[in-house]
Each structure stands twice: as structure tokens, then as C-alpha cells.
Image (cartoon, grey):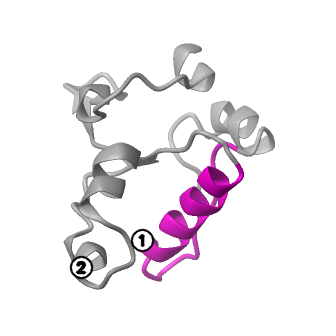
Amino acid sequence: MAAFNAARLQEYIAAGVITYTPPRRDDDKPAIYFAKSHIDQGKECIIVTNDNFADHIRGGDISTEWFNNHVVSYQWIGNTNRLMLNLHDLPRTVDMPYLQNG
């Protein structure tokens, strides 16, 4: 079984801009670690999720400021199978060329 339009995701996986998380496990910590490690390397990175990461903010894994700068929520557009990122969630303009390819 594959995700809807899974073949299209391969380009992003090969480019290293999408990563897998362990199945049947908490995927928050690997996502946060992946983002932090890329940010530490000077790369721009966002986490796309509707999770508010409150437990990770409380636990000290991330700060509210880090969350506000690196987490973007999303929503499905009707019955179109299209995903809209709420980039207005970010307090600044993010140069993410992969997000501009449609």
C-alpha cells in the first residue's frame, strides 16, 4: 500500500527534503531531530503537521519560538486530494524552492 501520489514524493525523498519516520511509533521526536540537524547545518527546514507539539515544548525538546519558526500546519482542500500549507503560520518568508514546484 502506498500513499496517494506516492511516486511524486520520490523526487523529494531523493533530494533529502522528505524523510521517513518509524512506523507505529511516536514520529514527533524523529521529525524534530531531523529538522534541528538540518537547521544546525544552515539549511532551511520546516515540519508540516497539525500537531501543536505542546508535550515537546513542555518537555524542553523545543521552545515556543522554535515551533513558531519551523512548524507549518496544513489543511485538505475539499475532495480534491490537494493539501494546502498554511505558510502564513511562519513569521517570516521562507525560501523553499521545493514547495514552489506545485
Q: Is residue 8 magenta?
A: no
Q: Amino acid at mark 1?
A: Asp
Q: Residue at x 36, y 44 (%)?
A: 69
Estimate the x, y position of residue 57 in percent, counting from the top left. Answer: 26, 73
Assess disc 2: are there few (<14), some (14-19) or many (≥20) residues with their C-alpha within 10 Å of its C-alpha.
few
Q: Residue 5's image quarter? A: top right
Question: Which segment did they paint magenta?
Answer: 17-41
Residue behind mark 1: 28
Q: Position of residue 70 (x, y in %)?
A: 40, 47
Which residue is at the far right? Answer: 14
Q: Nearer the viewer, mark 2 or mark 1?
A: 2
Residue visible at 31% across and 66% down? 63
* Residue 101 x %, y %: 59, 14
The dot on residue 13 is none
Amino acid tagged 2: Asp
Q: Residues within 10 Å of mark 1 (few under 14, many from 20)?
A: some
| Residue 34 lies in the magenta stretch | yes
Q: Quadrant of the N terminus?
A: bottom right
- Ranked by sequence position, the earlier of labels 2 and 1 is 1
Front residue of this view, candidates 17 and 79 = 17
User: Picture coordinates of residue 26 (x, y %)?
Assistant: 42, 80
State which quadrant residue 34 falls in.
bottom right
Which residue is at a point 73% across and 39% down the rendered structure image?
10
Q: Which mark is residue 55?
A: 2
Q: How many marks?
A: 2
Q: Are marks 2 and 1 in contact (CB under 8 Å)?
A: yes
Relative to the observer, which residue lies in front, 6 or 27? Answer: 27
